[in-house]
Image (cartoon, rainbow, N blue to C red):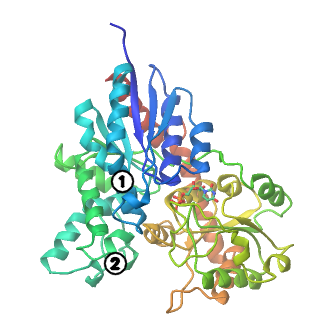
Amino acid sequence: MEKKNPCIVMVPSPGLSHLIPLVEFSKRLLSFQRENLHVKFIVPTLGAPSSSMKSILNNSLPPNSSFIILPQINIEDLTEKSDPATQMKETVKHSLPFIHQELTSLSFTNHLVAILFSLFSTDVIDLASEFNLLTYLFYASGATLFSFCFHFPQLDQEADDSSKNSLLELTDPVHVPGCSVPFQVKDLPDPVLFERSSEVYKSFLAVVKKYSLVDGVIMNTFTDLEPDAVRALQQEQNNNGEKNVPFVYPIGPIIQSETSNEVNKLECLTWLDNQPPRSVLFISFGSGGTLSQEQLNEIAFGLELSGHKFLWVVRAPSNFGGSAYLSQQKEDPLHYLPSGFVERTKGQGLVIPSWAPQIEILGHGSIGAFLSHCGWNSTLESVSHGVPVIAWPLFAEQRMNAVLLKDVFKVAVRPEANEDGIVKREEVARVVKGIMKENEEGLEMRKRIKELSDAAAAALSENGSSMKTLSSLALKWQSI
Ligand code: UDP
């Protein structure tokens, strides 16, 4: 009988920030190729697939990989219409019959070895045993967040024991195993701040409870970035043996080497080429972060006040920070800037609607700092390129990342909001001037982020910690 090729199946959760790291991971994995290992992306989508998603799948997948975009799930079919995390989970759940169908047809021609799925796709575990697949959570975030999520059922139990309806009623900061800095409850990921009886909270709890069922957790971090958190998780695994604590595999930082989406690329890079070294502040809120109209105005006026150069990716305002995350905006965002702003700042800054080639921008010598919403990919991209951060978290787990960046990695400043949650223009100007002028604190941050950037490169070098981990996984999968 003809030998079937080993195949690794990837099921990203909807959203670019889940797809991008899995694609990059596949490139690295297949570069270890000895046998005829194949990677198949099975991609659930909420609504019509975005052009960025199609562009990545069509242009960025490595040889020996292929993809299928599953029939789209419509938002009307979901019970949850506002929380992105629950929407992602529900989308994957609704897609399970299609995933099953794909696995069945793949199994005729391939030897299915393992299935990797991201954060909100844990329901695919239910299909794994039928196809005899090893299960791996591909955790596109870091070890500290995983450690929090893994221990979150205990925190829920404590809240239950003391009859709390919401974790917000807990007054003490939360200690996460492996993190030296405790987290204020308000900085925990969005879903856990909902009422404990809400669908969003229960759905998140159900997702993290499944973490203990997987064969391993592949994490987009590196040991030198989060040494204590990685150690704490490995220690727990050692102490518990096979019981309910999965193996952790830190294989990061996995970031894009170049953007596959050409939107605004030439304009941004040409403009940056004409700026002095380290003179430009880059401002971006990830693949879908949005600000209120008032906050948009305050940033605009604050940038003018600061006098520093900037490159700003602007989105149309919304009162919900993640409103463009799973849907595309149709209006022209530049219409929402204060009247005359673009003309007044012509020599000072460049404003780009909705999307920019972030990885090329962060790697450009003219960039001096990054005002970021602290998504984990952006965090790793900043660290890898040695760019200090003004931390401006909006939603999801971004507040925890902001705490890590500022208080644990010590490579960020965080502006103060007023009692209405707005960062006023004077505060914007203050933090921008502080980080761009390279005062003592700024220089210290720059030194620290350079060390982390070197450590990131070392982790990915031939004998680096992440490369060794990845090669051991590749060997394991090829030998099954
Ligand atoms: N990104 C980009 N251009 C943009 C906005 C985002 O290339 O204008 C990329 C960015 O480099 C990162 C990803 O999209 O790789 C965003 O992921 P992150 O985890 O930072 O944030 P999220 O989109 O999940 O909020």
Residue 374 image position (x, y, % from top left): 53, 66
Q: Would you say the beta carbon of the disc 1 residue lies within 8 angstroms of ligand 1? A: no
Residue 30 image position (x, y, % from top left): 50, 30
Quadrant of the image for the N terminus?
top left
Decide: is 216 above or below 439. Answer: above
Q: Which residue is drawn at 69% across and 78% down?
A: 336
Ligand 1's quadrant = bottom right
C-alpha span from label 1 to label 2: 22 Å
Q: Residue at x 51, y 91 (%)?
A: 420
282 horizontally vs 171: left or right: right
Q: Residue furthest front?
A: 76
Query: Tag 1: residue type?
Result: Val
Question: In front here: 34 or 82?
Answer: 82
Question: In front here: 254 or 64?
Answer: 64
Task: Decide: few, some or many residues near mark 1? Use Cα within 10 Å; few <14, some 14-19, many ≥20.
Answer: many
Quadrant of the image for the C terminus?
top left
Q: Residue at x 19, y 49 (%)?
A: 244
Residue 304 image position (x, y, % from top left): 77, 82
The residue to which callout 2 is attached is: 185
Query: Tag 2: residue type?
Result: Val
Which numbered circle lies on residue 113? none
163 horizontally vs 444: left or right: left
Judged from the image, the secondary structure of the residue bearing numbered disc 1 is helix
Instruction: Name which quarter of the figure residue 120 lies in.
Output: bottom left
Instruction: Name which quarter of the figure residue 479 lies in.
Output: top left
Residue 277 image position (x, y, % from top left): 79, 62
Q: Earlier in the sequence, mark 1 or mark 2?
A: 2
**Could one spot residue 144 in this view of the protein?**
no
The residue to which callout 1 is attached is: 230
Q: Are marks 1 and 2 in contact (CB under 8 Å)?
A: no
Question: In front here: 69 or 204?
Answer: 69
